[in-house]
Structures are given as C-alpha cells and as structure tokens.
Image: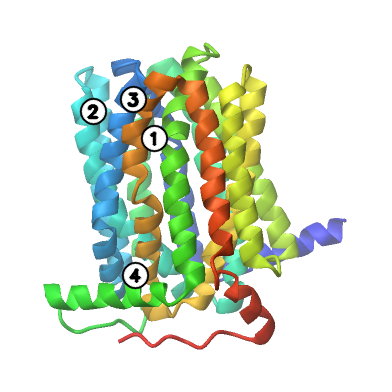
Amino acid sequence: MTFTRRLVGARMLQPLHRRDFALLVGGSIVSLLGDGFFYLALTWQVYAISNVPTALSLVGVAGTLPFVLFLLLGGAFSDRYDRRRMMIAADIVRALCVGAMAALSASGLIELWHVAALIAVQSAASAFFNPASTAIIPDLVADEHLGAANSLAGMYRPLMLRIAGPAIAGLVVAAFGPAPAFAVDAASFLVSAAAVAAIRTRPVARVGTGHGLRQTLREVGEGLAFARSKPWIWATLVAALLSLLAFMGPVEVLVPYLVKNKLLLGPESLGVVFAAGGVGSIGISLVIGSLGIPRRRVTAMYAFWSLGVLVIALYGVMTALWQAVLISMALQALFTAGQIIWETMLQQLVPRGLLGRVSSLDWLVSTGLVPVSYALTGPVSGVLGPETTLLGAGVLGALLMGGLLFVPGVRDPERSARDGPEPRFAAG
C-alpha cells in the first residue's frame, strides 16, 4: 500500500519537474486560496446588504454576463498574443476590482450596485484569463503528462478554493466582516501575476499576422468550425449549457440562503459546506491519478456529471448541516471527475494553435445561459420556494445533461483511444 501511494504521488507530481509549470501551479494555488475567501465573503456581504435571494441573483448576473460576452475575444487573443501577458494583465485588473470592494466594505459605504459593478469588470478580465490559462498548459507540460497535470489541479484547486479558503474565510468573516477576506483575494491576484511573469516558456506558434476585426473574426470562425466538426465537443457544450441553466443559479444563490435562513447557521458553517466539496474533489482526483482516465472516457464523463447534477436535488430536502456536507462532498467529487476527463481530452485532441479558441468556446457555450439562470432563480424561488426550486433544478439538469450522450458521434474519442489518435485539424 505504501509503495502504491508513493507511485501515485510520483506520477501526479511529475509535471512539477518542469519549472514553468511549477510556477503556474504556485501562482494558481495562492490565487485559488484568495478566491475561496472571495466567494464566501461575497455571499455574506450581499446578504448583509439585502437578505433576499434576488440580491445575490443580481450580483450573479453581473458576475457572469460580461464573462460570457468577452469569452470569444479572449480565446482569439490567447491564440494570437502572449498568453502570459494576458494572464498578468487580467490578474492586475481583478486585484484592483476586489481591492476596491475591500475598501468600500471596510468603510461601511458598500452598496449592492458597487458590488455588481466591480464584479462585472472582474468577470470581463476573467474572460481573458481563463482561456489563456487553459491553453498555456500544453506549452508547459509534455503531452503524456497532461492527465497527471489535470489530476494534480483536481487536488490543489478544491483544496484551496473549497477547503482552506472558505474554512479560514468563514472564521475571518464571522470575526471581522467581509472586508479582510476581500483584501486577501486582491493580494492573491498580485502573487499570481508575479508567478506567471516569471515563466520563461514562449510558444513558437501563433496564428495570424493581422490585428483587425476581420482577422479576429476569421480566427474565431476557425475555432467554431473545429468544434462543429466534433460531436463530442459541441454536444457536450450543449449539455453543459442546458444543465447549467437549470442548476447553477439555484445552487449558488439558494444553498447559502438556506444555510443562513433555514438551518440558522453562520458563515463558518457555510465554509464547512464548501470545504466538504473540496474533500470530495481531492479524493476523486487521487483515484483518477492512480488509475488513470477511464477507457470509456466520454461515457464515464457524462455519467459523473449527470449523477452530480442529480445530487443537487438533495439540497432541497436537507434539514441539517451534516446532510449539506455530504451532498457537497458527493456532487463535487462527481463534477471533478468529469472535469478532469474533459480537460484532458481537450488538451490531447484539440490542435495546440486552436486550443485557446476552443477553450473560450467551451467557457462561452457552457456558461452562456448562467446569467439567465441567476436572473430566474430569485423569481422562481419566490413562487416555488427555495427547496422546491433546488429539487426541480437537480432533476431537470440531470436529464438535460445525460440526454446528449446519445447524440451520434459523441463517443468517438472512445474509439480513437482504441484505434489511435484522431487526424489533426489544421489551423489557418
């Protein structure tokens, strides 16, 4: 058993032998810790201003709509320009936004429109950071180590974002209010920017020499054409689009509301619920890091995600903290398992010169209706009640996710894994 644990650890840590990837991971760990502070502090700050689900729904729309609107542009730029510089610039903008939120909260002057405006700008910056951060990984890690790199991320991401960050932030917010937690997140973005700036790797291939609107549109069109040619990409994106419409708003808005108003618990308890999800993510990452990606990878991915969405329905009938903890642990384990498979397939099967644009399309389509989900959550929960809304969201979302598995061609990567790699798609 000891030998097995050592073997798994060695396999998952192997990508860290690359200096530049280790820098990326180090900056990401600090930034994710800050994000764990931010999300809990944001929830508590908004409900302190206005203790109704509609308030957090409004902030959710402001925090997702700019992200959706700028994603394709962010993806095209990440395939054209230096991904490092894009990530650094985005981190600085996000640090300024969250720093302003910290100052307003500390002064006692913060209002709901302040939160909405600042998170909108932060969201737009993330639309440039996220595609670049996904596309840069194959520049830093050998192809055979991509699965290990994604499994490693599946461990440190929830450890920081859902365990350490919220657990500490819950205590900080309970004792001092949201302002210090916002300040920690602002500082974490600056650490991330410094780490990315120290990366030496410079990709040799970048598409396009023009910089006008026509060139940008052509590059975006190439990414769309590739995605349309692969049913496993476009069908999965549609499945994510529809299922996230059903459940994202209810989970993000109503679970904190129920913890506060039904279970009558404080921010430290919400931190425990978030942390439990992190434990589930880490556990499944260890399993996948040990056993590798399942051979029937598309089928497994859809199964994990569909079950995870269905588990959300249990939030609607929870009556105690321990139940919320178990639900969070299970659904995050299932979501993480599917995400590791998905990211590895994208990095292995999408040409390097198109990866930024396909990644941005992934973010765009899968999150495209999330602002609508947030906008609907307040009114729908006002009519049906928070519990019934969560029940319906879990069941409907699971059906929408699982149904797309049966689109012809979706399971092609399972055949290519047996028969050899797919033919490469040439970027223009």
222 and 245: which is toward the camera: 245
Q: Position of residue 150 (x, y in %)?
A: 57, 62
Q: Residues within 10 Å of mark 3 (few under 14, many from 20)?
A: some
Q: Amino acid at mark 1?
A: Phe
Q: Percent x, y for residue 72?
A: 27, 63
- Residue 21, can we see it? yes
Pointer 2: what residue?
Answer: 103
Cα distance, mark 2 to mark 1?
A: 14 Å
Snapshot quadrant of residue 278: top right
Residue 169 vertical placement versus 348 (above, below):
above
Q: Earlier in the sequence, mark 3 or mark 2?
A: 2
Q: Residue at x 43, y 64 (%)?
A: 134
* 378 relative to 233 in the view: left or right: left
Tell me the kind of residue under disc 3: Pro
The residue that appears at 24% across and 56% down in the rendered structure is 70
Q: Residues within 10 Å of mark 1 (few under 14, many from 20)?
A: many
Mark 3 or 1: the one toward you: 3
Structural distance between the alpha carbons of marks 3 and 1: 26 Å
User: Which residue is tagged 3?
Assistant: 379
Residue bearing the label numbered 1: 38
Q: Position of residue 309 (x, y in %)?
A: 57, 42
Residue named by callout 4: 357
Measuring 17% from the left and 78% from the top, which residue is drawn there?
A: 215
